[in-house]
Amino acid sequence: MRGFRVRAYCPVGDLVAGMAYLVRRLLENTSNESFLHEQANGVPLEELLAPP
């Protein structure tokens, strides 16, 4: 283990073009670690935009 967090996506149901991408983005942007959440908690923009 290297301490990295990962998120596994498992498609369920009929395939709708683009739906998997939209759902993934929705989940990312509503998670506790999303860009907006981190920015609201005072994390500097430079840190959020820094390369991993």
Image (cartoon, rainbow, N blue to C red):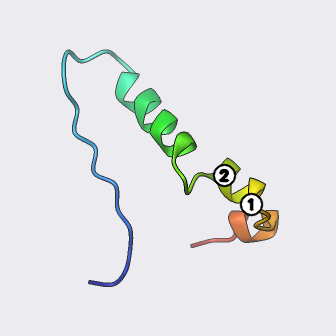
Can you tell which quarter of the image residue 45 is in? bottom right
Q: Quadrant of residue 11?
A: top left
As drawn, 41 above or below 51: above
- Name the residue nearer the viewer: 46 or 28: 28
- Residues marked 2 and 1 touching at CB (< 8 Å): yes
| Amino acid at dot 2 | His
Tell me the quarter of the image containing the C terminus.
bottom right
Q: Is residue 14 left or right of residue 36?
A: left
* On screen, residue 47 above or below 27: below
What amino acid type should be assigned to the residue bearing mark 1?
Asn
Instruction: Measuring from the top left, give residue 23's x and y in whole percent.
Output: 42, 30
Residue at the extreme bottom of the image, as rendered: 2
Instruction: Tell me the residue that label 1 is attached to.
Output: 41
Dot 2 lies on which element?
helix
Q: Which residue is mark 2?
A: 37
Q: Identify which residue is drawn at 38% across, 74% down.
A: 4
Q: Residue at x 74, y 60 (%)?
A: 41
Residue occupying image coordinates x 28% and y 43%: 9
Which numbered dot is residue 1? none
CA neighbours of label 2 inside 10 A, class few (<14), some (14 to 19), many (20+): some
- Residue 2 against residue 10 in the figure, above or below: below
Report crowding for label 1: few under 14, some 14 to 19, many 20 or more residues within 10 A (C-alpha). Answer: few
